[in-house]
Image: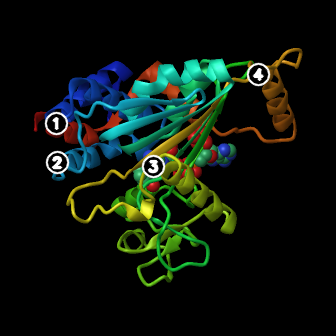
Amino acid sequence: MERDGLRLAYPDLVERIRPIFERNGCSPGVARLLAENCAAAERDGAHSHGLFRLKGYVSTLNADGWVDGRAVPKVEDAAPGFLRIDGRNGFTVPALAAGRALAVEKTRANGVCILAIRNSHHLGALSLDVEPFAEEGLVALAFINSMRAVVPHGGRRAVFGTNPIAFASPRAKGLPFVFDQATSVMANGDVQIAAREGRALPPGTGIDRNGEPTTHPKALLDGGALNAFGGYKGATLAMMVEILCAALVGGKFSHEVDLAAHPGAATPHTGQSFILIDPACGRGALPGFAERVEELIAEIHAAGQERLPGDRRHAARETSERAGILVGREMLAAIDAMAAG
Ligand code: NDP
Ligand code: PYC
């Protein structure tokens, strides 16, 4: 044990947290997938959606039927380029795992495939959902809506979720190019972390329950709302995510998610959509896709941008793989308490 905590290899961290999910009603398969998802977010330095979320998973699994940890997703082959998955009120991660191989097969056959997941709950980092597709040579765009937390531009109360968009593309060199960003000024998870640590939010982050600007995380969380990033442009993207994840997939809009009747519920019961593209399809004599991406990245670096989106997560992953994932003492105690029940 170091002064700051314990460094654990990824498989050891997965094994440490997997019993938490099993103890709280997940099937062994779902428990493994969720443990891997949490551990991978922590490994990549995506702290707002890693171990920090364990408490939320536990309270959610115990929130009077809000989510089914044993759900078996139903994969529906809707059309050559359209795959629908009913999460059956389980988590989105196993729903994606259930349809992943067929989605890749369809993308390769058609050049493109829409993957539409509904009736499911997601509490993770979206980068983890898209990057594996790019590792297989595909371009992947993912969208997810959540629960009302973001105010429409010029409005006074929340309508949208924090609605992240993630994108992954193969590169000619090294790991895929990945970005993963909420359409809000910051993720709700980061507001919760600021509240816990007693830190003020930057001006412009959001409003309180009366619609007035606030920098107090607790005032924002207590009936207030986050702003979308970039004013009306970000709000428009948040709206697009609602359309793609609710209207398109047959799921709920974020404003329709009602956690109030299920004390402890922390996961949004919504939808997720993917657009998958096979860049090799129909290219004929065109120049190599991954090489063209590399040329663009070289130009961006030459223009002076050193850090690309995804670089921090990949660097954190490299450190975690080399030295282990650092789990703080307090978190370790919390994990062991949750695993012991
Ligand atoms: P950040 O604002 O921290 O980062 C957004 C993107 O910008 C990342 O790709 C990041 O790369 C990149 N980036 C950050 N700083 C720079 C910089 N200086 N130069 C270039 N690129 C930069 O993320 P968010 O707070 O918006 O989202 C955090 C997480 O919350 C995401 O993983 C998201 O999926 C998750 N989330 C999940 C939700 C759900 O419903 N499941 C809802 C909302 C959010 P890097 O990653 O390498 O830092
Ligand atoms: O951090 O905004 C967030 C969030 C919402 C749902 C899951 N994470």
Q: Spatial distance from mark 2 to mark 4, Cα to Cα?
A: 45 Å
Q: On residue 113, which mark appears?
A: none
Amino acid beneath label 3: Gly
217 relative position to 313: left or right:
left
- Write down the residue under mark 4: 290
Query: Which residue is rendered at x = 43% and y = 73% of the image?
Result: 216
The residue identified by callout 1 is 25
**Residue 118 on image: x %, y %:** 41, 44
- Which residue in the protein does label 3 denote? 250
Q: CA distance from mark 2 to mark 3?
A: 26 Å
Task: Give the amino acid type for the residue marked by disc 2 in the picture.
Answer: Asn
> Ligand 1 within 8 A of label 3's CB?
no
For disc 3, the neighbor class at 10 Å (few under 14, some 14 to 19, many from 20) is some
Q: Residue furthest front?
A: 79
Indicate which label's residue lies in the foreground, 1 or 3. 3
- Quadrant occupied by the N terminus: top left
Q: Earlier in the sequence, mark 1 or mark 4?
A: 1
The CA distance from mark 2 to mark 1 is 8 Å
Q: Quadrant of residue 235?
A: bottom right
The residue type indicated by label 1 comes to Gly
Q: Which residue is mark 2?
A: 62
The reply to whether residue 63 is in sight is: yes
What distance separates the C-alpha of mark 1 from that of mark 4?
43 Å
